Image (cartoon, rainbow, N blue to C red):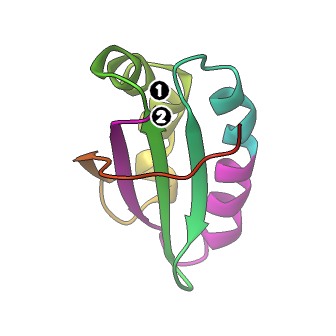
Amino acid sequence: MVTLGLFVLLEAKPGKEDEVEAFLTEALALAEAEAGTTAWFAIRLGPTTFAVFDAFPDEASRDAHLSGQIAKALEEQTSRLFAKPPAINRLNVLAAKLPG
């Protein structure tokens, strides 16, 4: 059961939209390797606006994700790809429907 999540809002620098999309698409493999990440979605909200939503069963899993490979890659690419630092929002999941 998922109880916690993250919603990370990302704003691409002008001309970097395709690179941001590729970065997020490639990050899926890293998310799949995280045992504690129950669900992970990379989303395009508009021409330059992207987001990541992920869900976790507990705080330890969310903390592991926040210190994991995706977070490190995002930190390394922030100044190159994004107009401003990612807006990381911690949230509580009230209800969810997941496969299985």
Q: Which residue is pictured at 53% across the width and 84% down the height?
A: 46
Locate residue 17: give its quadrant.
bottom right
Asked if disc 1 and disc 2 are in contact, CB closer than 8 Å, the reply is: yes
Q: Position of residue 95 (x, y in %)?
A: 38, 52
- Looking at the picture, which amino acid does disc 1 mark? Lys
Q: In the rendered image of this protein, does residue 38 appear above or below residue 84?
A: above
Observer-nearest of 92 and 8 = 92
Q: Tell me the crowding category of disc 1: few under 14, some 14 to 19, or many 20 or more residues within 10 angstroms, Cα based.
A: few
Q: Mark 1 vs mark 2: give the one in front.
A: 1
- Residue under pointer 2: 76
**In the image, what residue type sits under mark 2?**
Glu
Q: Is residue 11 left or right of residue 4?
A: right
Q: What element carries label 1?
A: helix
User: Which residue corresponds to mark 1?
Assistant: 72
Q: Please report the residue visible at 75 percent of the width from the left and 32 percent of the height from the top.
A: 29
x, y percent for residue 90: 24, 44
Q: What element carries label 2?
A: helix
Quick check: 72 above or below 50?
A: above
Start and end of the magenta stretch? 1-25
